[in-house]
Amino acid sequence: MTFQYFSTILIALSLCACVSPKDETHSETVAPASAHTAEVEEPQFVYGKCYKGRGPSCVIDGDTFYVGYDKVRIADIDTPETYRPKCEYEAQLGARATDRMIELLNAGPFDLVTSGQDTDRYGRYLRTVERNGQSLGSILVSEGLARPWTGRRRSWC
């Protein structure tokens, strides 16, 4: 398994640390951090909204974003859908959650923490996103922009 990032990133997997191939215009380093944490050192990335749903380094919605070209699903929250929302309330809240996650990701370095399953059925990396030990997802929950993930989606309408 490799991660392709455009900034310095620390990654450690249970038994092996893997290095991504070098990109001609961007340098990257992968080195051990801890058994279940990858630190994304900012501010080389500047996150914005994904347009047409693809990376690099953009936010799809409040709980899904790209780090480089790797899609990450924030494992501890559920946010309203921005693609095909079921009602106007979901569309508006989803847009606010997306904008807030962009702010949080751009605020400085964060850790991608593995807990349990590595990927979901869509191939997205399941990670909790933390800064200084605090979940960025929990910030969205406290602001009313997300719910704690319970294992299934519920309607926002």
Image: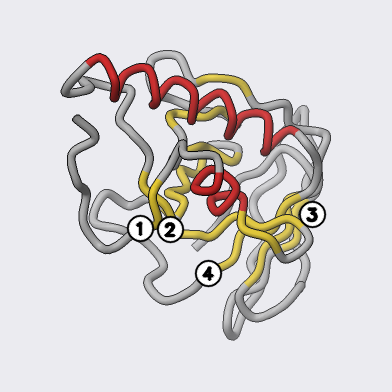
Image coordinates of residue 66 in percent, x first then y, are 52, 37
Q: Residue at x 68, y 29 (%)?
A: 103
Residues at marks 3 and 2 touching, judged by CB atoms closer than 8 Å: no
The answer to whether 34 is drawn above or below residue 135 in the figure is below
Q: Closer to us: mark 4 or mark 3?
A: 4
Marks 4 and 3, how far apart at CA:
19 Å
Query: How packed is label 4: few (under 14 Cα within 10 Å), some, or many (20 or more)?
Result: some
Tell me which numbered mark, 3 or 2, is placed earlier along the sequence. 3
Number of callouts in the render?
4
Above or below residue 77? Residue 84 is above
Q: Residue at the location (43% across, 58% down)?
A: 75
- Marks 4 & 3, CB-CB < 8 Å contact: no
Mark linked to residue 89: none
- Give the label on residue 114, or none: 4
Position of residue 132 measured from the top left corner of the image (x, y, whole percent) = 78, 61
Q: Describe the element under mark 4 as helix, strand or loop.
A: loop
Marks 1 and 3, Cα distance to the nearest angstrom?
32 Å
Looking at the picture, which amino acid does disc 3 mark?
Thr
Marks 2/1 in contact by CB < 8 Å: the verdict is yes
The residue most toward the bottom is 15
**N-term mark: 4 or 2:** 2
Q: CA distance from mark 3 to mark 2?
A: 25 Å
Q: CA distance from mark 4 to mark 1?
A: 15 Å
Q: Which residue is mark 2?
A: 75
| Residue holding disc 1 | 149
Q: Residues within 10 Å of mark 2 (few under 14, many from 20)?
A: many
Q: Tell which circle, 2 or 1, labels the residue nearer the N-terminal end.
A: 2
Residue type beneath disc 4: Thr
Q: Residues within 10 Å of mark 1 (few under 14, many from 20)?
A: some
Q: Earlier in the sequence, mark 4 or mark 3?
A: 3
Point out the frontmost of discs 1 and 3. 1
Q: Quadrant of residue 26?
A: top right
